[in-house]
Amino acid sequence: LGGDGIGPEVLAQAVKCLQSVETTFNHHFTFSPALVGATAIDQTGNPLPDETLEICRNSDAVLFGAIGAPKYDNDPNAKVRPEQGLLKLRKELGLFSNVRPVHVYQSLIDRSP
């Protein structure tokens, strides 16, 4: 989810890093771009379209860029805001902050910092 502002640019670089991991360690990642935030509002009227939420629910992980846009930041009367998409995504996926749950595998604990 590239999102808004610098988000798509940052996400593109993160994807390059993950593609390097694929090559180096013989992993495979599947990327499914979807709309969120101001970009989603501008295209659909909804900061978190149902299609985006469904893609996230069906994924093992969600890579998120950034959210927000000056045209919404500078309009305190906006009824729909980009941040609503992020808040709904967190609620629907059971996430409560920017800290994400992690599962540590016992067999890999000695390889972790």
Image (cartoon, rainbow, N blue to C red):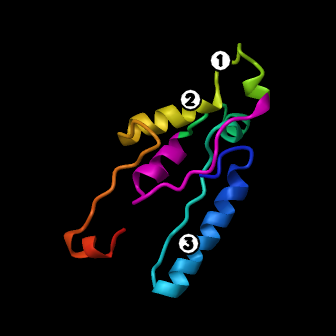
> x, y (%) of residue 85?
56, 34
Magenta span includes 31: no
Q: CA distance from mark 2 to mark 3?
A: 28 Å
Residue at image coords 60%, 72%: 17
The percent position of residue 81, horizontal first and vertical second, equals: 64, 26
Q: Amino acid at mark 1?
A: Lys
In the rendering, at what x and y percent does residue 100 appear? 40, 48
Q: Residue at x 32, y 76 (%)?
A: 111
Label 2 or label 3, whichever comes before in sequence order: 3
Q: Residues within 10 Å of mark 3 (few under 14, many from 20)?
A: some
Which of discs 3 and 1 lies nearer the camera? The answer is 3
Judging from the image, what secondary structure is the residue with disc 2 in?
Answer: helix
Q: Is residue 52 above or below residue 32?
A: above
Q: Amino acid at mark 3?
A: Leu
Which residue is labeled 3 in the image? 18
Say which mark, if any, is on residue 79: 1
Which quadrant is the C terminus positioned in?
Answer: bottom left
Which mark is nearer the camera, 2 or 3? 3
- The answer to whether residue 33 shows anywhere in this view is yes
Label 1 vs 2, first from the N-terminus: 1
Q: Position of residue 79 (x, y in %)?
A: 65, 17
N-terminal of the pair, mark 3 or mark 1, is: 3
Q: Nearer the viewer, residue 38 or 55?
A: 38
The 10 Å Cα crowd at callout 2, few under 14, some 14 to 19, many 20 or more, is some
Q: Which circle marks residue 84 in the picture?
A: 2
Residue placed at 21% from the left, 75% from the top?
Answer: 107
- Where, by quadrant of the figure, is residue 112 drawn? bottom left
Q: Is residue 98 above or below residue 24?
A: above
Is 27 situated left or right of 8 in this image? left
Q: Which residues are magenta?
A: 50-70
